[in-house]
Amino acid sequence: MGSPGNPQCPQWFVSFATIATGLALSVLPGDNSNMSGGTIYSLEAMRAEKRSAAGNSLLAAIVITGLKIAVGITTGSLGILSEAAHSGLDLIAALVTFYSVGVSDKPADADHQYGHGKVENFSAFVETGLLLLTCGWIIYEAIFRLFFRHIEIEPSLAAFAVMLISMCVDWWRSRVLGRIASKYDSQALEADALHFSTDIYSGGVVVLGLVLVLAGRAYHIDRLRDSDPIAALFVAGVVVSVSWRLARRTVDALLDAAPPGVRSKIHDAVSRVDGVLEVDRVRIRRAGNRYFADLTVGLARTVTFQRSGQLAGAVSAAVHSILPDADVTVQPLPRAQRSENIFDRIRAVATHRNLNVHDISVQDIAGDLHVEQHIELDERMTLKQAHDQVTELEADMRRDVPEISGILTHIESEPATIEMPEELVSDAELEHRLKTAAAQFPEILDVHEFVVRRVRGRLYVSLHCTLSDDLSLARVHDIQTELEIRFKQDAPELFRVLIHPEPSTDNRR
């Protein structure tokens, strides 16, 4: 050990430091990744690179901690010993990080249905606790040396060398870990990178403390002899600052706190989706580098199940515009629109019971509304079953639409079996009669493509009917109904008539 006036670096330290520095720098990965935007990385490549970074950081931590302990003991510097304690806890944190990045990217299983990403958040929480323990010891020892027991410091060349080596290695691995943490959004690696970046500044404070101790001896300034424990207190302050920032982030992640501002962004984006009436609930949680979003949105109660699925997809796309890799769950809720008319409200009640009504007619008789409607029920039901179901439906409609005075429902059978036609019928005389009947309607331009089938001993006829393009759909329906009645009058043998209307522009030859 050299004297204070001429600090020397022991030969053992020179050899050890040379080997240690080469090892510490050689194990750290280079910056050889493709960081271009939009790059998609496979799960295996991500796991391999994260584990490599964590493993190399662990080896570097072992080397640096060993150097600081050796020099701290030989010099008696509390600043260096505090840095050694800090590095020792960083070593433990690096071990936890190495384990966590190996587990966090495992896929979800039956026991961990949201994956294993929380392991990374827990790893960062453990690091926070270790840093706080470090602060307690450093502050206690610094106050003890300042006020109760003065310890002479021997700031040798080895002390300066190990701190400079440590700062270089910390700069290098904080840069590499920060790059990979940003690349894969890893909170555990980000915590490690933050640790090592602050170690650079705390190491600089320790070096400054040693310089001031040397200056105090050279110029006989007694106050500067306490620079080492004061520097240690500055190190503790840095560690407290880091711990506080990590504590807030890790506790938020473990308690499933939503990222600041993200919920309002998602709410606004989903509210702009055409067809979404309201955004009832937005829940966001994070596990590792993966986000999970649960949303409840209000949709018009008259939309079909298929349309509801399409809107849920659009809502998921809106969330992905904010959180690209989020796992999104959307729950639609039926909502009544202010713009609903009485027909919409009647259909909504039927849809609520999973029934379909059609041919709805609403008549205002002396101020009272009377509803007539058709409903199709399973042909295998008995009349009693069908009537009971319709009675319950009508009661619901009166309750939901109280302005209705009376309801009359025409019950039709909904086919549940595929019919097999017995034969195709070619009947020129029947076709002539039907064309003659259609010719009596001035709005009908043409009828064609007659098909006559015999099904279960009954005649079914289908045909195409050409009408003017500008006719309203209501008028087209009326013409179809009137034509069907006329056909059955002129050809009573017909059981069912199906008329397909076509605009004249689609029927030009």
Image (cartoon, rainbow, N blue to C red):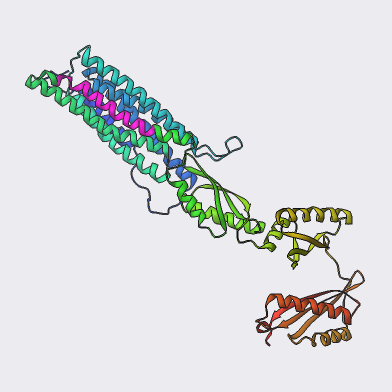
Q: Which SS type dominates the magenta stretch? A: helix
> Residue at the spot x=20%, y=14% of the render?
151
- Relative to the observer, which residue lies in front, 393 or 244? 393
Residue 356 image position (x, y, % from top left): 75, 60
Query: Is residue 238 within the magenta segment?
Result: yes
Residue 126 as seen in the image, left or right of residue 359: left
As displayed, is residue 371 above or below residue 96? below
- Relative to the observer, which residue lies in front, 284 or 371? 371
Residue 160 image position (x, y, % from top left): 19, 27
As displayed, is residue 220 above or below residue 121? above
- Relative to the observer, which residue lies in front, 174 or 370? 370
Considering the image in quadrants, where does the C terminus appear? Answer: bottom right
> Residue at the spot x=75%, y=81% of the render?
465
Name of the residue lying farthest toward the top? 148
As displayed, is residue 397 above or below residue 170? below
> Residue at the spot x=51%, y=55% of the render?
271
> From which residue to which does the magenta span run?
224-246
Residue 229 image position (x, y, % from top left): 22, 21
Q: Image quadrant of residue 418?
A: bottom right
Residue 116 as seen in the image, left or right of residue 135: right
Residue 141 as seen in the image, left or right of residue 486: left
As displayed, is residue 460 above or below residue 403? below
Q: Image quadrant of residue 147?
A: top left
Residue 161 as seen in the image, left or right of residue 180: left
Is any atom of residue 7 visible in this view?
no
Q: How many marks?
A: 0
Is any atom of residue 427 visible in this view?
yes
Name of the residue lying farthest toward the left? 219
Query: Is residue 346 within the magenta segment?
Result: no
Residue 165 image position (x, y, % from top left): 24, 31
